[in-house]
Image: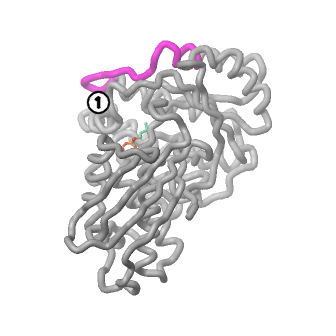
Amino acid sequence: MTSATDFIFETNTVKEPQVQQGIFTWSAPSNIALVKYWGKKENQIPANPSLSFTLNNCKTITTLHFVKKEKEGISFDLLFEGQPKEAFKPKIQKFFERIVSYCPYIADYHFTIDTTNTFPHSSGIASSASGMAALAVNIMSLERTLTPDMTPDYFLKKASFLARLGSGSACRSITGSVVVWGEQADVDGSSDLFGVEAPFEVHPNFSNYQDVILLVDKGEKQVSSTVGHDLMHNHPFAQERFKQAHHNLSELKNILQTGDLTQFIALVESEALTLHAMMMTSMPYFILMKPNTLQIIEKIWDFRAKTEIPLCFTLDAGANVHVLFPEKHKEPVLAFIQKELSKYCQNEHFIHDKMGKGALLIQ
Ligand code: DP6
């Protein structure tokens, strides 16, 4: 699968044209990027490759009910936590419009999409990655019903390909636990079209790697990721940044294999700050960190210097802080977070997560 046209569904391959209705439920997790995707070309092609850890507890659970209809066209109802949610419909409508040329059969069905998140709504955690991934795997379950001899490899790649068209980072939420998206010379099988599981052995230091998400600001972001990506087009440092991301991904590949946590910390924190540096040097410029984001970073650096426990932070496109650390240091780090960091979070709220395995068919 080397070009988008490889994912166009051939209507003449349908083996089960009589499928009238059905229902699937999938869960799909969020993910946290270590080498960041920031900047994109047309059709959701990333300006640089990225690498993420798939999460385990922060996920979206989506049920897709489909019924064959007479008239062709995109048609769906959307429920969020069991209640109709008009506000979420435009994003899904756009997603269906983007994927219909790859999945023409979606125009033959009326869908009821019922979706919930395991993390609180408006917690500042973007649900677009887990949400779009959960919807994409459901659509692929329908496609597999029409063409039952589909290979598992095709299922996962096309699910990631479709999720990408909903939200770029969603393509890294289909499988676990270390995922690369974007062409990178020294990562076999890597592609701009979909995410792939890291094709190398990851050192046991990273097994069950922990991620505590500190909810510094649960409000709506002032600048969306989509706008931020766009500002990379005329950005004075863009070309250097894209080069650096390739370089950092090569480095991180080595670090993940050798298990060198000191190098890991330096690279991951530098990537997080570079992402925010790109925002601060865009035109117009913007700052998504809050004073408490910086307070937390300072505290993490202090604690690391004092205890020599290898914890570090990363940031996504917002004020929240992800604290990353090896499982064996769980107890002292959680005690530190509770005592020293939770006070910088809204309502002292944080979420304890860890590396996970990707999307799961529930029904
Ligand atoms: C900072 O995937 O949310 O989290 O493709 O426009 O939906 P769209 O953007 P999105 O961007 C995520 C940016 C990031 C870094 C990352 O996850 O790699």
Q: Tell me, yes or no, if residue 187 can be seen here.
A: no
- State yes or no: residue 290 in magenta: yes
Kindly indicate the quadrant of the structure image that contains residue 208: top right
Ligand 1 under 8 Å from disc 1 Cβ: no
Disc 1 marks a residue whose amino acid type is: Pro
Q: Which is more toward the observer, 363 or 189?
A: 363
Taking the spot 52% from the left edge, 45% from the top edge, the residue there is: 30
Q: Eyeballing the image, is 150 above or below 55? A: below
**Judging from the image, what secondary structure is the residue with disc 1 in?**
loop
- The color scheme shown is one colour
Residue 269 versus residue 187 in the image, above or below: above
Query: Few, some or many C-alpha atoms within 10 Å of disc 1 (few <14, some 14-19, many ≥20)?
Result: few
Which part of the image, by quadrant, shows the C terminus? bottom right
Q: Residue at x 48, y 59 (%)?
A: 190
Q: Quadrant of the N terminus?
A: bottom left
For the point 64% across and 46% down, the residue is 355
Question: Residue 180, position in %: x, y?
Answer: 51, 53
> Is 4 situated left or right of 176 in this image?
left
Which residue is the site of mark 1? 236
For the question of whether residue 3 can be seen, the reply is yes
Residue 9 position, x and y percent, is 33, 75
* Residue sitting farthest toward the front: 83
Q: Quadrant of ligand 1?
A: top left
- Magenta stretch? 281-297
In the rendered image, residue 111, in percent from the top left (x then y), is placed at: 34, 62
Establish if 63 lies above or below 244: below
* Left or right: 303, with 216 as reference point: right
**Which residue: 51% across, 60% down?**
25
